[in-house]
Amino acid sequence: MDKVRIKEAILVEGRYDKNTLSQILDAAILETKGFGIFKDQAQMRLLRQVAQRRGLIVFTDSDGAGLVIRNHIKSAIPAQYLKHAYIPDVMGKERRKASPGKEGKLGVEGMSREVLLQALMRAGATFEDADDVRGKGVTKQDLMALGLSGGANAAQKRRMLLKHLNLPENLSANAMVQALDLLYTPEELASEVRALELEHG
C-alpha cells in the first residue's frame, strides 16, 4: 500500500508511535520522548522552528499523559503553527505490551491505518499529491559537498553551523540531515554555510 504524503511535520510521543505512522505516511515524524520534552530546551527550539517553517501536527495519545504533553506544546508554540490530531478512546492494549496502560486505552501505535488517516484529515493535514514533489531535499551528500561531513574539521563545522542556526548542537549526523531538510532547501543551506564562513573567515 502506498504511503500518504503530508506536508506538515508530525509530533508523536515515542518511537513506537513513530514506527506505526512511518509505515503509512511519507512525512517528517518527530518525538517528544514522552515527558522528555519538558526538560529538552534544544528539542523545543527545533520544534518551534519546524512549526514556523512547515506547520506541526500534534498527535499524542488520548490518555492523561498525552493531554499534558499536548498542553505543554500548546503553551510553547503559537497556535497558528499547530494542528491537533486526536485518536478516539479505544480500550485495549498494544500487542507488544504485557498489560494495558494506566488508563487502559490504546495509543497512537495501536490504531489502524484508517483511524490514523481520518484523525489527520480531521486535523486539517495538508495531503500532497505524490507527483507534486517538493523539490530535492537536503541530503548527506549536500553535507559532504559543504564540508560538513567526511572532511577535516567537519565535526567542528557542524557544531558551528548548528549554533549559528539555533539548532541543538548535539544532533547526530542523521538527525541533523532530518532537521536541516525540514527547515532549509539545499540552496538556503549553502547560503547559510557561506554566511557562516564569511563571519568566521
Image: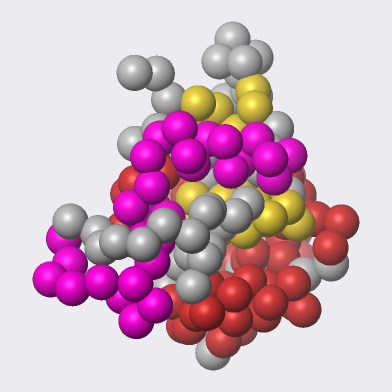
On whether residue 119 falls in the magenta region, the answer is yes
Q: Of 190 and 128, which appears nearest the observer? A: 128
Q: Could you tell me which residue is drawn at 35 percent across and 54 percent down? A: 109
In this picture the colour scheme is secondary structure
Q: Residue furthest top?
A: 131
Q: Of 130 and 23, which appears nearest the observer? A: 23
Q: Residue furthest bottom?
A: 39
Is residue 142 visible to the viewer in this orientation of the structure?
no
Q: Residue furthest front?
A: 91
Question: Residue 19's spot in the image, x, y percent?
Answer: 32, 49
Q: Of 52 and 103, which appears nearest the observer? A: 103
Position of the C terminus by quadrant: bottom right
Is residue 88 visible to the viewer in this orientation of the structure?
yes
Q: Is residue 112 left or right of residue 83?
A: left
Position of the N terminus by quadrant: top left
* Stretch of the chain drawn in magenta: 96-124
Q: Could you tell me which residue is drawn at 84 percent across and 63 percent down? A: 79
Question: Residue 92's spot in the image, x, y percent?
Answer: 29, 61
Question: Residue 129's spot in the image, x, y percent?
Answer: 62, 16
| Residue 91, placed above or below residue 127 | below
On whether residue 6 falls in the magenta region, the answer is no
Q: Could you tell me which residue is drawn at 61 percent across and 41 percent down? A: 120
Q: Could you tell me which residue is drawn at 25 percent across and 71 percent down? A: 100
Question: Residue 172's spot in the image, x, y percent?
Answer: 38, 64
| Residue 98, placed above or below residue 118 | below
How many numbered discs? 0
User: Quadrant of the rendered structure where residue 90 is?
Assistant: bottom left
Q: Is residue 191 left or right of residue 4?
A: right
